[in-house]
Image (cartoon, rainbow, N blue to C red):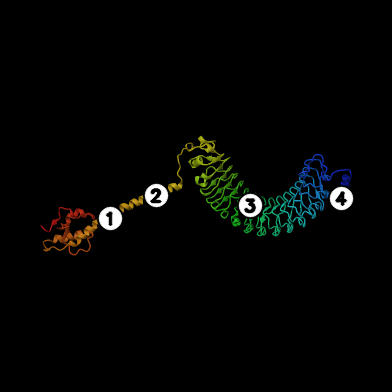
Amino acid sequence: MVSMSLVLLQLLLIFSGGSLVSGFCPKGCSCNDQQLVVECTNTTLDVLPIALNTRILHLKMNLNKINIVDASFQFYEHLETIDLCRNLISRIEDKSFAAQKNLKVLLLDQNRLIRLNNQAFTGLWALEELSLRNNLVNALPTGLLDELTSLKILDLSHNNIQTIPSQVFRLCSNLLSLNLGFNKFDSVPSDAFENTRKLEMLDLSSNQLKLIQDGSFNFISTLISLNLANTSLSSLDKDSLSNLVLLKNLNLSENKLDSIPTNQLRNQRKLNIIDLSNNMFKVLSPHAFRQLEALQVVNISHCPGLLQIQAASFHNNLDLHVVDLSNNPRLSDIQPHAFPQILHIQTLLLSYTGLTSLHEDAIPWNRLIKLDLSGTRMVCSCQLAWLTSSGDVTGGVCSQPSRLAGTNLSQITTADLGCGYQYSEEVIVVAIVCAVVLVLALGGAVTCCLLGKKMRNLGRMRNLAPSCTLAAREQDLKSSYDNCLYVEKNYGLVGSERPGLIYSGMKTVQAPEKEEFKNLRVGSLDKLLNSDTLVSNNQ
C-alpha cells in the first residue's frame, strides 16, 4: 500500500511538470545538484522525502524525527552514502535498502532500534561500512549480515546485545574492523571469528567476559588492535593471545589483573602500545615486559594499589618513548635502574603519586624531554640535585626542608639544596677500586725492589762461600773454622766445602771470631766485608 502511494505521488509530480532530475528540495534542506548531495539536518522531517533528485549520491538526514525506514529509498538507487543518525528510528522494514546496489556507507547511530529482522539489510552487496552504534539492539539474528559480503567496518557498540551467535559473521570475509564494545555478552564463541580472517581491529570492551579462554582468537592472526578494557578480567589463559603475533595495540585497562601478564604476552613482539591502567597491581617486577621489544607507549596509571617499580622493570624495552605512571597515590618507590640509562624515553608522567624522592639512577633523566611531577611533594635534598639538569620538569613542590617548602621543583638549584656536584655510586666505586689497585701496584714494586736487593746480597755471599777452607794449622787457626761455620749458619751459605778462609775479591781474609758478630743480621754482607776485624790471611 505504501509503495503504491509513493508511485502515485511520483506520477503526480511528473504530470504536474515537476522535474525528477533536479527534484524538489524541502524546506530546511540543502540540495546540490552538481555534487548530487542532499543535506537535511535538524529539521522537522519525520519521513524520507521522495521528491528529491533521483540521481543523488549522498544523503544526510541526521537530527530529524524519522521513526521508520521503509521502501522510500527505492527511488534513490544511485546512493553511495546514507546518514540517518540521531533520529527516532525504531524499525527497519525488510528489504528497505534492496534498491541500493551501490551503497557503501550506512549510518544509523543513536536511534531507537531494538530488534533487527534478518532481511533488514538485504541487497546491500556493496556496503563497506555499517554503524548501529548507540541503539537498543538486543540480539543479532542468524543471517542478518549474510548479504554484506563487502563489509569492512561494522560498529555494533553501545547496545544491549547479550550473546554473540557463533555464525553471525560467517560471510563477512572482508571485515577489517569490528566494534562490539559496551554490550552485555559474557563470552565469545571460539568459532565466532572463523571466517573473518582479515580482521585487524576488534573491540570487546565493557562486556562481562571475566575470562579470555585459549583459542578465542585462533582464527584472527591478522589482528593489529585488540580492546579488552573493562571486561572484568582477573586473568588471561596462558595461550589466549599466543596467535596474535601481529598485534600492535592492546588495551587491558579497567580490569582486575593483579600482575602483568608477562607470559601471556610472550608472542607480541610487535606490540607498540599497551594500556594497563586501572588494574590491581601492587608491584612492577623485574623484566615485566621482557618479550615486548617494540614497546613504545605504556600506561599504568590509576592503579590504587601500586606501591613500587622494581629494578629492571623496563630493561628489555629499549624503544620505550612514553610511560604514564600518574595517579597512583600509593606509589612511593621507583628503585634505581628501574629504567635502563640507554632508554630513549622522552615522556615520563609521575603526577599525583606518593613519591617523596627520586633516585638519580632510577630513570634516564638526561634523555627526558618531559617529566611531569604535578601534585607530588618532594623531600628536597641532594638526592634531587640531578633535577636541576634534567629537561622540562612540570609541577611538583618541595615539602621539606622548611626553608624550601612550597618551592616549585623546576626552580630549585644545587645551591638551594646545599650541595655541590654529587658523584654517583658507580663513580665512587670505580675510584675506590682504582685506588686499591694503585696501592697494590706500588706495594708490589717496593717488595720486588727489596727482594731483588736481598737476592743480590745472597748471591755475593754464595760466591764467597766455596772459598771457606780449613786452615793449614787447624789447632792454631781453629777460630777460622768456627767463624766460617758461624757465617754459613747465619747467612745461608750452602755448598761450602770446608770453612776456614773467606775471599773478598782478590783479597784473602781470615774469618773473625763469631762472638763479634752475634748481633749481625741477615742481609748485612756489606758490613761484614767492610769490617776492620777481618784479618788478611796473606799477611
Specify few, some or many for label 1: CA neighbours under 10 Å numbering under 14, 14-19, or 20 or more. few
Q: Report if the CB atoms under discs 1 and 2 are less than 8 Å apart.
A: no
Q: Which mark is residue 3?
A: 4
In the image, what residue type sits under mark 2?
Cys
Along the line of sight, the residue nearer the viewer: 294 or 32 = 32
Of the residues under marks 2 and 4, which one precedes in the sequence? 4
Q: Report if the CB atoms under discs 2 and 4 are less than 8 Å apart.
A: no
Q: Give the CA distance from mark 1 to mark 4.
A: 121 Å
Q: Give the CA distance from mark 1 to mark 2.
A: 27 Å
Q: Give the CA distance from mark 1 to mark 3.
A: 73 Å
Q: Give the CA distance from mark 3 to mark 2.
A: 49 Å
In the picture, measured across the screen, residue 193 lies left or right of residue 522, that is right
Q: Dot 1 lies on which element?
A: helix
Q: Percent x, y for residue 348?
A: 56, 45
Of the residues under marks 1 and 4, which one precedes in the sequence? 4
Residue with the most extreme bottom position: 497
In the image, what residue type sits under mark 3?
Leu
Along the line of sight, the residue nearer the viewer: 535 or 464 = 464
Q: Give the CA distance from mark 4 to mark 3.
A: 49 Å
Of the residues under marks 1 and 2, which one precedes in the sequence? 2
**Can see residue 322?**
yes
Of the residues under marks 3 and 2, which one precedes in the sequence? 3
Q: Which mark is residue 434?
A: 2
Q: Return the residue at label 1.
A: 452
Which-is-in-front pick, marks 1 and 4? Answer: 4
